[in-house]
Structure formats: C-alpha cells, structure tokens
C-alpha cells in the first residue's frame, strides 16, 4: 500500500506531523513464525530504573484501524493481531508510560519495528501500528506518559517549574524502554526473538531515531529517521523567527503575497538543475532576491494588493534566518521554495486588524518550557529578547532534548545503519539544520565516505514536511534500509515520486548528500532516468 501524510488541523493551523505508514514492497521475505504461541499471559521484565505496573494481552480481530487523537486517519485490511500493553513507571516520578506492541497472528516476517511520534505525541496513534502489522511486522510504540500532538499540559508542575520526568520520558528514556520491552514481548509471544530491529519516524519521530543512534546504539539494526527535529532546543525557538520579524517590522504579508514570493523564487531557481521542471533541486543555492517583486500586483480574495518594500524585507529576513542584533547567524531560515505560511501565518481580528499566528509547536515550546508561562505573549518579543531566549533554551535543554551529539561511533561500531530523507521545501523544520548536523558528524568521524558507510542523507527537491509519506510524493525508505541492513547493499539513490510546482507528479532518484540531481540534457522531464546525481560544483 502507499504511504499517506496525515495532517491534522487545530484552530485552522496544520500540524507539522506525519504518521509514517511503511510499505512491504522490498521486504516481504518472512520467517517461519505464523501463529503467536502466547497471547494470554505475557511476562515482561522491568527495564532498568522502572517498575512494571501492568501487562495486558488481548487478541484483536484487525480490520480497519482508526487513529486516535488529532491526527486521526485510518488503515484498512489489518489482519488479526495480538495486542500487548505494558505500563511502566519510574519510582518516585509518578509517571505512567504505556507501551503497546502489536504482533500479527499470521505471517510474521521475523522483524521488529518501533514507531516514533509527531509534535508532542511521543508515539503512534494506531494507524502506523496497523500498517506495520499488515506488512508482517511485530511493532511497538510508546506514549511516554504524555499526551496528544498539541497537548502540553504536562510541561509544568504545580509550582510552575519544568516537569522533568515526563520531559525526560518524551526526550529519550521512554523510547529506549519501548525497544527493550517490545523485544521482550516479541520473544514471549512468538517464542523467539526478532531477527532484525528497526525504528521508523518523521519529525518528532525523526528526532527520536537520531536520539536512539546517539544514546542507545544497540537498540536497532536500522533507523529510518526522516525530516528529523534534531537540535530541538535550538530549532524550536528559531522557527518562531518569522513571527518575530513580522511583529518587529510591523508588517504582515498576506498568504497570497507570501505565495507570490515563493512562486517567484521557484521560477527563478528552477533551471539550477539544467531543466525547467518545476523543482528547485538545490534550494540552498537559490539566491532569488525578494526585492525583485516590489511593486508587483497580487490579486487576493478579490482585492488587488501591491507588494511593498516592507513585505520584501520581511521575506528576506525569514529566508535568511534568525540572527543576533550584531548579525551573528543563529539558525538556518525557512528554505527558499517552502510554504512561508507555515511559520509566517497571520490571522485577522474581529476589527480586521492583522496579527501573527504562531505555529503551535514552537510557540508552546517557548511559552511552556523556556518562559514557563503559558500566557506569555509571543508578539512582544524584540530582536534582542529573541537572541536571549534562543540562548536560554540551549542552556536549559540541550543536554535533555538537543539530540545533536555528532559522535555516532558507537552506533557505527554496533553495525547500525541510519537513513534519512528530508524535504528541501520543509516549511516547519529547516532542511539545512539536518545538513548542519550531517556536516558535524563528517568533521568528527573522518569525512563523507567514512560516514556514508553507516549514515546516508537524501534531500528531496520541492518536498514539504514529511511529504514523502504517500499523500502526494512517496519513497520507500524502509525497503532501502532493510536491504542495506540485511543484504549489505547501501542505497546510492532513493527512487521517489515528487510533486513539482505545477502539482504534477514526477519520478526522481533522490541523490545521496552532498550530490544533487541534474538534467542530462535529453529525455522526458517526468522520468528519473533523464537526471543524474552530481556534485554541486559540477553545475
């Protein structure tokens, strides 16, 4: 089955979150296991530092699984499975983290998979679990004892201080404990351990995958961590920059005007890959100057608007990214070609006054964790205060949830493989943040080729946040990962279906970073075979 990007809408704002639905195309070899040996009394050992509060095992008939919470969604045709739920607590912390493991009654492929979360949801809402079971996996996920995608009620304790236990669960320890418990459940139900263990996730799930590679290198043989929210303590503050810019410049471009800047930039930089195909293959090299649109007329909801110098200045700052008042770069900006409305959203008051509408995920991080004041008004942040808040978030939370340790030697030495794709038009997590981390790993671990032995990054032209999970674009990263882990065949490219600026689906092979796709000069622009991967210096 194809993957789907499931976007929820809360108060009119789409969540930067995706439920990853794995496909089975290249991984359908199954083991001899067929029927669970035990779906009644399952014994589970407490992972270090925890106590098991409860264990339940229930046979589920399968069918159509509907996702819980804001993300919703559904998957049909799920076969019967054994559902084992284990609740853990950390003595003295008063937490209750639930780990769910689903095991197919028939046709287990011998593999174990764990699924990460989205935004502030630590794990899967049921749709990914159902899809994994449908594809023959024994699969697990954890709620880490926290809430839904936009539920941050657990952030502060009764005294208004950071609630450390659930934050630690969300940041790292619950994912590791899910790996330990999930593998034990597989052994208890099937009577033998899984042959291979994989982690899959996008966004928050991508960050969790990198965390596993950094802190628990023996948990998984392969990790598929897409559009990862690594450097969480930095990028969450950094992605409020568009709102800070608009508020300080007292200029709020409409959505139509923002789209005009994006469309003009894509048109101007389209030919960087040698073909006018509606895709910017190396967004980091697009130097379109938004001031070129000053004076341009835009029709928006029946009104004719004129793009001003102030509008262009705002967009220029947003693309450039956050800086200190002395000009020091703090973080990459929104990629050129990405939908600016994601982070530069606006809303009109009842008196028609336009004001900023911050994206909830970074807004909650700043109000609840950095300021520790849910009522804090983000619109009051000056440029100078923004720099201080950025530094404060780093100082308080990098060790807990930064997930940016560049030393992956233990994961490499364990034989693990890490695979990532990231859309070059990601409107919520700046793509160059992932590139920055990859470069840090290369500097620490001996250069591109040495790192490519166990960690490969692919950038997807024209692709939005988690946008290759099947709604429009798609790629089968899990198939590539299992082939790499189990057969030793590292992916040179990732075959993908992309959506260009005209909304048309085109076939491309995603290039292994730092290479980029370039037109050969002949052939159908819709076909991957008409392009080749080259070094940016070969343009």
Image: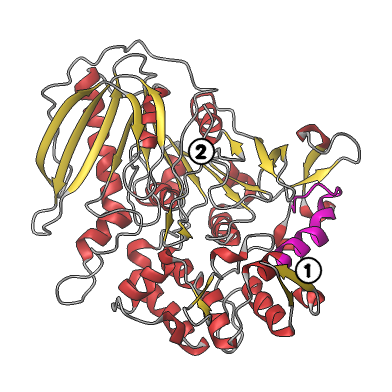
Residue at (72% x, 48% y) in the render: 515
Q: Distance between the residues labelled 2 and 1?
A: 32 Å
Residue 232, image x, y percentages: 43, 63
Q: Is the magenta stretch mostly helix, strand or loop?
A: helix
Residue at (44% x, 41% y) in the render: 413
187 over 54 or under it: above or below: above
Front: mark 2 or 1: 2
Q: Nearer the viewer, residue 269 or 419?
A: 269
Q: Earlier in the sequence, mark 2 or mark 1?
A: 2
Q: Residue 288 carries which label?
A: 1
Q: Can residue 189 be seen in this view?
A: yes
Residue 198, image x, y percentages: 41, 34
User: Which stretch appears magenta?
Assistant: 260-280
Residue at (85% x, 49% y) in the render: 276
73 over 479 or under it: above or below: below
Verify whether residue 232 appears in magenta: no
> Residue 108's image quarter?
top left
Q: Nearer the viewer, residue 301 or 285?
A: 301
Residue at (15% x, 42% y) in the render: 87
Colouring convention used in this rendered image of the protein: secondary structure
Q: Which mark is residue 507?
A: none
* Secondary structure of the residue carrying numbered label 2: loop
Q: Name the residue under label 2.
A: 4
Verify whether residue 278 appears in magenta: yes
Relative placement, left or right, of 60 versus 399 is left
Residue 48, image x, y percentages: 17, 46
Q: Nearer the viewer, residue 102 or 393?
A: 102
């Amino acid at each position: 089955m194809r993957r789907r990007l499931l976007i929820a809408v809360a108060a009119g704002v789409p969540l930067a979150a995706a439920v990853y639905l794995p496909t089975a195309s290249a991984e359908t070899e199954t083991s001899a296991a067929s029927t669970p040996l035990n779906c009644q009394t399952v014994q589970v050992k407490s992972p270090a530092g925890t106590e098991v509060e409860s264990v339940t095992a229930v046979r589920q008939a399968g069918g159509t699984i509907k996702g819980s919470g804001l993300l919703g969604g559904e998957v049909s045709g799920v076969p019967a499975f054994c559902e084992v739920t284990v609740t853990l607590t950390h003595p003295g912390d008063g937490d209750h983290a639930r780990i769910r493991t689903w095991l197919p009654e028939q046709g287990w492929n011998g593999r174990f998979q764990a699924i990460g979360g989205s935004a502030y949801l630590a794990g899967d809402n049921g749709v990914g679990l159902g899809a994994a079971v449908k594809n023959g996996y024994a699969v697990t996920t954890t709620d880490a004892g926290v809430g839904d995608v936009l539920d941050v009620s657990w952030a502060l304790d009764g005294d208004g201080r950071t609630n450390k236990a659930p934050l630690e669960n969300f940041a790292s320890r619950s994912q590791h404990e899910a790996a330990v418990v999930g593998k034990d459940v597989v052994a208890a139900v099937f009577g033998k351990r899984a042959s291979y263990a994989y982690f899959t996730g996008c966004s928050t799930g991508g960050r969790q995958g990198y965390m596993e590679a950094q802190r628990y290198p023996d948990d998984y043989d392969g990790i598929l961590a897409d559009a990862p929210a690594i450097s969480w303590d930095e990028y969450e503050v950094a992605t409020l920059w568009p709102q800070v810019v608009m508020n300080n410049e007292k200029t709020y471009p409409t959505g139509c005007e923002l789209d005009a800047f994006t469309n003009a930039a894509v048109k101007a930089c389209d030919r960087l890959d040698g073909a006018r195909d509606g895709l910017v293959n190396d967004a980091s090299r697009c130097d379109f100057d938004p001031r070129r649109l000053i004076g341009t007329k835009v029709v928006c909801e029946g009104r004719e608007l004129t793009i001003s110098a102030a509008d262009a200045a705002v967009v220029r700052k947003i693309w450039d990214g956050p800086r200190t008042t002395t000009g020091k770069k703090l973080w990459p900006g929104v990629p050129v070609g990405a939908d600016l409305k994601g982070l530069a959203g606006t809303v009109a008051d009842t008196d028609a006054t336009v004001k900023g509408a911050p994206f909830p995920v970074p807004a909650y991080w700043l109000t609840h964790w950095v300021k520790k004041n849910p009522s804090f008004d983000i619109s009051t942040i000056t440029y100078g205060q923004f720099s201080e808040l950025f530094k404060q978030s780093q100082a308080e939370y990098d060790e807990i949830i930064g997930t940016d340790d560049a030393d992956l030697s233990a994961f490499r030495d364990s034989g693990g493989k890490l695979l990532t794709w990231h859309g070059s038009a990601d409107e919520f997590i700046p793509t160059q943040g992932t590139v920055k981390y990859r470069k840090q790993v290369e500097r620490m671990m001996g250069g591109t080729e040495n790192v490519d032995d166990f960690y490969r990054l692919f950038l997807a032209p024209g692709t939005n946040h988690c946008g290759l999970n099947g709604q429009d674009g798609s790629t089968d990263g899990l198939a590539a990962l299992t082939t790499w882990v189990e057969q030793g065949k590292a992916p040179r490219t990732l075959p993908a279906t992309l959506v260009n600026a005209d909304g048309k689906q085109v076939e491309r092979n995603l290039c292994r970073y730092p290479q980029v796709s370039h037109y050969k000069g002949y052939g159908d622009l819709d076909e991957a075979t008409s392009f080749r991967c080259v070094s940016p210096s070969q343009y």
